[in-house]
Image (cartoon, rainbow, N blue to C red):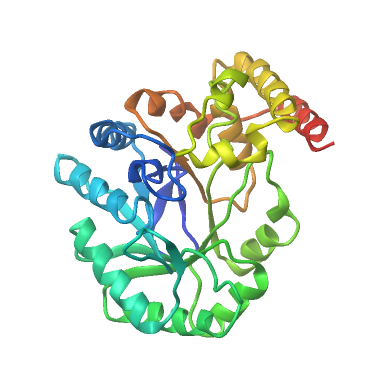
Amino acid sequence: MQTKKLGNSDLQITRIGFGAWAAGGPGWEFAWGTQDDADSIAAIHRALEHGINWIDTAAVYGLGHSEEVVARALQTWPGAEPYVFTKCSLRWDADGKINSSHSAASVREECEDSLRRLQIDVIDLYQMHWPPRDNGPQLEEAWQTMAALQKEGKVRWIGVSNFDPAQMRRAQAIAPVTSNQPPYSILRRAIEAENLPFCLEQGIGTISYAPMASGLLTGSMNRERAAALPPGDFRSRNPEFREPKLSKNIELVDRMKNVGARHGRGPGEVAIAWVLKNEAITGAIVGSRSAKQIDGIIGAADLALTPQDISEIEGAAAAVAR
């Protein structure tokens, strides 16, 4: 599979990475609902079989459980070890309530906890999951600590997630930013205005998440399934999965199915390929809950959309936006 250099690092990552958000399982605020660990491990193994060489997770996914599942998958994987990316700055209390935390002590403790759960000696990319909610000076405190962890060899490279250009500039004044991880899809294009041009100019890699809009663009989401999403699935609270937006989104997916049919690909692969066509995007994080889902998206890595394809997709997306 084709690879691309991630920012200022020595990491050559595949254009698609495995996203382990859903592997966290049920019972926390941003869960995807019930998830079988064996299915998650099988999905990770299938991704690696297809040549994907990086896994993105976070401490908060499943309140630590996602990292533990990733560790189990790596322990039983006989091939070359993939890069492991994880995140800090979101913690939880005894009741599972998630809080933002950016103190030096917290970042250090989180790093040690992630290393223990992942059962690895070094994290390939350590990312600040979110900036401080008040946009205050703890951004600098956390970033200084992450830079120190890099010098100490606990992590190889350091990046951010959900940062805007002004926040990345603040971090860069302390230590280089390897990458940013924002949401990006045909339905969420806000980062095109300033974020992506800034990262491209500064040599900061961009690994985008939710290229299929949390499963909305896969072709498997219909009105009945959206209506039946359980309360434990965070998507049940997402306006994109409810009317009046849902019908327009389904129409967009139908257009993407037509585009995909010309290439022998599914709508989810078209959605991912649309993200990857942007030169500022180093790689896209694709979450999968089963090996079968991996088989259904892997073709996006080498799908080259034509100008006609793009015009058809973007025209349909504009109708959704209205």
In this picture, residue 157 sits left or right of residue 243: left
Q: Which residue appears at 35% of the width and 66% of the height?
A: 93
Q: Quadrant of residue 237?
A: top right
Residue sitting nearer the eye, 156 or 191: 191
Which of the image's four quarters has the N terminus? top left
Up the image or down, 194 lies above or below 107; here it is: above
Name the spot of residue 116 as percent of width and height, x first.
19, 63
Residue sitting nearer the eye, 318 or 49: 318
Q: Quadrant of residue 105?
A: bottom left
Up the image or down, 108 lies above or below 22; here it is: below
Name the spot of residue 159 as percent of width and height, x first.
47, 67
Up the image or down, 293 lies above or below 146; here it is: above
Name the spot of residue 107 as percent of width and height, x first.
36, 76
Q: Residue furthest right?
A: 322
Q: Which residue appears at 20% of the width and 46% of the height?
A: 74
In this picture, residue 288 sits left or right of residue 185: left
Q: Which residue appears at 39% of the width and 77% of the height?
A: 146
Q: Residue furthest front?
A: 95
Residue sitting nearer the eye, 251 or 259: 251
